[in-house]
């Protein structure tokens, strides 16, 4: 232990110095190294936090503390792991830049991959390094992001996610065109939303790698649109690859779709049809120029649901459906 960091050196205050030395040794034994932090007082403050966290009896209270420190966790994470992550988070808030850089090297984080990382020895750079490490602590492959702002954004969103109720997470899924199902457990919502948050922040080159891994790479036609639109399209396909089992359970013909937004549009229309009365169903069917008087509600709903799927299908799948029905497609038609 480097005893120069924050330790009194006045020989006339030997008792005080002995206490400082003892504190340094005790802190080091508990993973708080005063020489790395650069201040004995800060080391005392962190050590007190460690003791405070160990004394928290309620798992719910411990998870709230994790959320306050930007540490993502849930019911599946063991208590001991929560405390370890809290310790790292506390250290990252206090370590100087040089020590944070060493931490990044220890965790194989390539700092050259961050285009917005401050290059000078400033407080901004120190805070950015802490943001990078905290995101990494939450399981994010930070070197793929390309920016510190993306890493910090993911940490904020992960933390907010931990505080959400099931109903709030379902509302986010609806907003992001992801499927909601009553039988889905909270843990599955957390996992899916964390994936979505991560994908929203990835640059296009990394999204292409993700699509390769999930076997949902878009066709060459998407290359003609802007880079940002390509990014959004890749995310849409990834979300569908993650959620297709839920769409299948909700009645969608999953083999005919390739994006989450299109499949979710079908689900929303299914919900509207299931909630509609017989008179509204008759009006919808008659608007197609078809007679509805002799049809029962179950038949109307079934036919209108099929129509909803056709309307939301990508063009290639729609052509295939026409061929299956024995319908000819005029040459040059789109």
Image: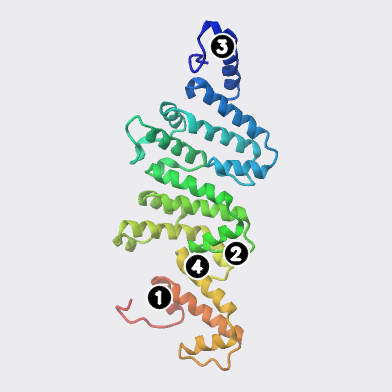
Q: Nearer the viewer, mark 1 or mark 3?
A: 3
Residue 173 pos. (x, y %): 52, 60
Residue 147 pos. (x, y %): 37, 43
Q: Secondary structure at mark 1?
A: helix
Q: Return the residue at label 2.
A: 181
Q: Are marks 1 and 4 in contact (CB under 8 Å)?
A: no
Q: Measuring 48% from the left and 70% from the top, which residue is drawn there? A: 265
Judge from the rendering whether residue 111 lies leftward or rightward of residue 52; answer left or right.
Answer: left
Crowd tier of the residue under label 2, counting other residues whose Cα lies within 10 Å: few below 14, some 14–19, many 20 or above: few
Q: Return the residue at label 3.
A: 17
* Mark-to-mark CA distance, 4 and 3: 67 Å
* Mark-to-mark CA distance, 3 and 2: 63 Å
Q: Secondary structure at mark 4?
A: helix
* Mark-to-mark CA distance, 1 and 2: 30 Å
Q: Secondary structure at mark 2?
A: loop
Q: Return the residue at label 1.
A: 319
Q: Return the residue at label 4.
A: 264
Crowd tier of the residue under label 1, counting other residues whose Cα lies within 10 Å: few below 14, some 14–19, many 20 or above: some
């Amino acid at each position: 232990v480097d005893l120069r960091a924050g330790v009194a050196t006045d020989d006339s205050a030997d008792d005080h110095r002995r206490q400082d030395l003892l504190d340094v040794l005790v802190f080091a034994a508990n993973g708080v190294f005063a020489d790395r932090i650069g201040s004995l007082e800060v080391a005392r403050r962190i050590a007190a936090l460690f003791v405070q966290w160990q004394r928290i009896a309620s798992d719910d209270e411990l998870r709230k503390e994790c959320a306050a420190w930007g540490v993502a966790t849930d019911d599946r994470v063991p208590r001991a792991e929560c405390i370890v992550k809290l310790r790292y988070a506390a250290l990252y808030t206090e370590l100087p830049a040089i020590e944070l850089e060493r931490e990044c090297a220890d965790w194989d984080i390539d700092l050259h991959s961050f285009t917005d990382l401050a290059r000078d020895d400033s407080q901004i750079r120190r805070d950015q390094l802490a943001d990078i490490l905290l995101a990494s602590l939450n399981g994010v492959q930070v070197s793929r992001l390309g920016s510190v702002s993306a890493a910090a954004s993911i940490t904020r969103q992960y933390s907010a996610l931990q505080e959400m109720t099931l109903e709030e997470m379902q509302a986010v899924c609806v907003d992001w065109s992801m499927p909601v199902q009553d039988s889905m457990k909270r843990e599955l919502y957390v996992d899916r939303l964390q994936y979505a948050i991560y994908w929203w922040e990835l640059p296009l080159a990394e999204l292409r790698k993700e699509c390769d891994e999930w076997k949902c790479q878009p066709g060459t036609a998407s290359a003609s649109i802007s880079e940002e639109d390509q990014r959004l399209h890749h995310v849409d396909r990834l979300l569908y690859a993650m959620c297709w089992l839920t769409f299948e359970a909700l009645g969608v013909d999953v083999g005919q779709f390739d994006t989450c937004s299109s499949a979710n549009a079908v689900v929303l229309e299914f919900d509207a049809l299931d909630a509609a009365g017989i008179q509204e169903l008759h009006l919808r069917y008659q608007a197609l120029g078809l007679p509805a008087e002799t049809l029962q509600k179950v038949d109307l709903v079934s036919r209108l649901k099929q129509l909803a799927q056709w309307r939301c299908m990508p063009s290639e799948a729609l052509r295939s459906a026409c061929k299956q029905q024995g319908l000819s497609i005029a040459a040059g038609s789109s």
